[in-house]
Amino acid sequence: MIVNRYRNMWQIPSELLVAIQNGNIDHCAALLAAGADCDQIFKINSQSHPAICVGVQRGTIKLVELLIRSGSAINRRDSDGRTPLHIATEFGYVDISKLLIQHRADINAGDNKGIAPLHIAAKRGCVQLVQSLLSHGADVNRKDNTGKSPLIYACGTPNINFDVVQLLLANGAEPDEKDDTGYTPLIYTLSSPNYTYDTVKTLVSLKARLNLCIPDGRSPIHFIIQSYNPEKWKCLNLLLKHGCDINQPNQIRQTPLHLACLLNDKESLRILIRAGANPNTSDVLGTTPMSCAAAFGKKKDLVELLLRGGCRADPEMLKIMNLSWVIPRLREPENLMEYSRRSFAKYMGGGLADWVENHRDEVPTTLIPFILLQSCEN
């Protein structure tokens, strides 16, 4: 294609923009040969976009190659501070990303928010991009302007890619680094609606702090109780087994038991009581787990579990809560077997279920449901 070298110099840049946006390589080549600036800055919706950034966004690798051969600056930034590598990573263009890296793109360049290409690749959950960036020297622990590392980006997505998390950790990502809000990778993981047991297990195995609280007082165990993830109970058992504080209060002094009762989560309540949680704690308003269980539907099965855990309540308060049937139970002498079970549960903590599983041949079959609180009313 032949382009008139003497045409209006305002016309060539606009033609170049259209040619790049349309992926018309021949027209681009002709315009560049006619004197079009390969580093032309285009104004699109009041934002500045270098020619190479527009070309990368188009996603045509031969077009990007043409611009690079013509001398386009490989690390040219747009109005948001993004380089071509940022854009290629954001759109998931693996081949274009590799091409830019081969031509010495700045791997660790941060945009106006301090976000580097590795942050973007981790958030996208793209193993190929993460691997490529890491293999070329990307800083695995680089933080953006809010203190978030690539691992936090990987753990904070709605659909966490376990392979990306593993890859980052294998390359030296800090498993317990906090961002400016006080959240860690583990807390971000448990905040995600679709977190997986494998991701939680990996972070826990690398000694992630289980009792670290964010400013509102919540720790990982609170996030698990409040989630609706199908693997929440496996994760709860895992944290208890590794020694998390089972009675950790949040900012308003609510313990995991309070939350389990408020959410009518019988299985979480069973796991907590089985591991020796204290059912006699009060929040800042004086509300106990028993009050929560009674107020939200008067669930007899929740109340039964709390009683099995050693709950002691004021008879007058029980009358107010329409739980008069509990009063005779509280007046009965302490049951030796129940006392022994609770003492053993507190001693074993989160490892009780594993102990029973490993000693099934030694424990009488009839005692197993009793020890694991599986004999409570359903």
Image (spheres, rainbow, N blue to C red):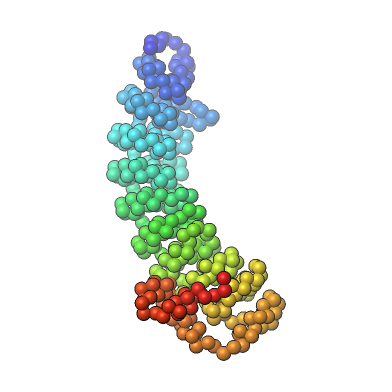
Residue at position x 50%, y 88% in the image: 336
**Residue closest to the far bottom:** 333
Up the image or down, 247 lies above or below 156; here it is below
Residue 197 lies, in percent from the top left, at 42, 59
Residue 348 lies, in percent from the top left, at 41, 77
Residue at position x 39%, y 57% in the image: 198
Up the image or down, 166 lies above or below 245; here it is above
Quadrant in the picture for the C terminus? bottom right
Q: Is residue 69 left or right of residue 41?
A: left
**Residue closest to the far front:** 365
Residue 214 in view, yes or no: no
Give the total number of marks visible in the rendering.
Answer: 0
Residue at position x 45%, y 80% in the image: 367
Residue 198 in view, yes or no: yes
Residue 258 picture quarter:
bottom right
Residue 2 picture quarter:
top left
Q: Is residue 265 left or right of residue 63?
A: right
Residue 75 picture quarter:
top left
| Residue in front for this viewpoint, 216 or 166 | 166
Residue 243 lies, in percent from the top left, at 41, 71
Up the image or down, 33 lies above or below 366; here it is above
Q: Is residue 324 left or right of residue 100?
A: right
Quadrant in the picture for the N terminus? top left
Residue at position x 39%, y 52% in the image: 162
| Residue in front for this viewpoint, 164 or 362 | 362
